[in-house]
Image: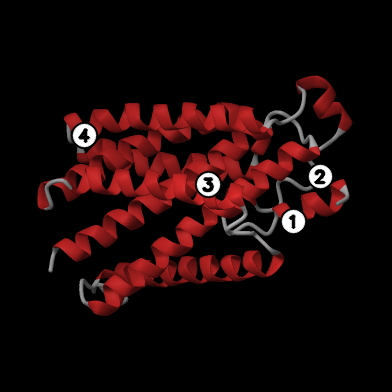
């Protein structure tokens, strides 16, 4: 596979953080100045971001504060969007993103934990269990991210995003509960959450593949931080969806 064709495939991730930012990043000047991306480097930086996220989550877990939680969500969203459009700044922005999202995750988890004791440990365990299982499936070839697989997952992820946007608009301007089955704890609601969890989890396979290909193609080293940031985006989405699914199941 040529460098150009390999980089082209990176823009097809279901994870919006990967779209269009691997193509054209592998300049000789970039690699000469900073070196090249490695798989080990991306993994190490993912570990750093996870540690930062857990550290700030501990703050709002032990000292619940709605202002910090909402502030973390807003700041995290802004930093995430800025990072997506400025991957070269990922080394500076990704750690701040992880800290901000940690404040939000710690706060939202406390709310769920107060209603369903023990749900936090279950959600965290399932999230990292899913991460480990899919990594094994990817490395052993049990799940192969073919072009059809990628296109299907991108379409499904985009569909969920649009559905959530419509739901937010309906809740904001309609004053109701939005699209009922998204929030329902009935069979349709639980089924919908299971589908979303599955799609979020499968996005991890694409993330693994894109990071590995990026390392093989020798793109600039700053993309290690961008790859780690992108994995964090998927993991946070997966964790929140698992939390919602568990809450629906336990509310019955």
Measure how far apart labels 3 and 1 are at the Cα level: 20 Å
Residue ID at (30%, 33%): 57
Give yes or no for contact between labels 4 and 3 (Cβ–Cβ under 8 Å): no
Q: Nearer the viewer, mark 3 or mark 1?
A: 3
Mark 4, other Cα within 10 Å: few <14 / some 14–19 / many ≥20: many
Of label 2 and label 3, which has the lower sequence position? 2
Q: How much space separates mark 2 and mark 1, taking CA atoms?
A: 12 Å
Per the image, label 4 sits on a secondary structure element best described as helix
* Helix, strand or loop at mark 1: helix
Mark drawn on residue 135? 3
CB within 8 Å, label 2 to label 1: no
Q: Picture coordinates of residue 100 (x, y %)?
A: 39, 35
In front: label 2 or label 3: 3
Mark 2 or mark 1, earlier in chain = 1
Task: Report if residue 19 is visible in the image.
Answer: yes
Residue 60, given in percent of the width and then of the height, sits at 23, 33
Residue on which the image places disc 4: 61
Per the model, the C-alpha gap separating discs 2 and 3 is 27 Å
Please report whichever mark, 4 or 3, sits nearer to the chain's N-terminal start. 4
Residue under numbered circle 2? 24
In primary-sequence order, the first of circles 1 and 4 is: 1
Q: Earlier in the sequence, mark 4 or mark 2?
A: 2
Q: Of 226 and 146, which appears nearest the observer?
A: 146
x%, y% of residue 55? Answer: 33, 26
Circle 1 residue: 9
Local SS, label 2: loop
Q: Residue at x 59, y 27 (%)?
A: 91
Residue at (21, 76) in percent of width and height: 186
Asked whether disc 4 touches disc 2, contact meaning CB atoms under 8 Å apart, the reply is no
Which residue is more in the foreground, 126 or 16?
126
Q: Of 77 and 192, which appears nearest the observer?
A: 192
């Amino acid at each position: 596979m040529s460098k150009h064709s390999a980089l082209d495939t990176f823009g097809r991730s279901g994870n919006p953080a990967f779209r269009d930012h691997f193509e054209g990043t592998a300049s000789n000047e970039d690699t000469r100045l900073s070196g090249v991306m490695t798989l080990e480097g991306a993994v190490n930086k993912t570990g750093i971001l996870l540690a930062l996220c857990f550290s700030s989550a501990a703050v709002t877990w032990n000292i619940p504060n709605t202002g910090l939680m909402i502030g973390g969500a807003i700041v995290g969203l802004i930093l995430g969007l800025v990072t997506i459009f400025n991957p070269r700044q990922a080394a500076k922005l990704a750690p701040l993103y992880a800290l901000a999202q940690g404040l939000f995750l710690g706060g939202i988890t406390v709310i769920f934990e107060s209603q369903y004791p023990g749900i936090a440990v279950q959600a965290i365990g399932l999230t990292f269990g899913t991460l480990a299982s899919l990594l094994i499936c990817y490395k052993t070839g049990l799940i192969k991210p073919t072009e059809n697989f990628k296109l299907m997952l991108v379409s499904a992820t985009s569909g969920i995003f649009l559905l959530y946007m419509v739901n937010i608009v309906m809740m904001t301007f309609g004053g109701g509960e939005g699209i009922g089955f998204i929030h329902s704890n009935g069979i349709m609601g639980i089924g919908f959450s299971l589908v979303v969890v599955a799609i979020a989890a499968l996005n991890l396979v694409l993330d693994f593949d894109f990071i590995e290909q990026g390392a093989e193609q020798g793109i600039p080293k700053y993309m290690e931080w961008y790859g780690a940031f992108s994995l964090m985006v998927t993991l946070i989405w997966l964790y929140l969806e698992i939390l919602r699914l568990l809450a629906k199941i336990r509310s019955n």
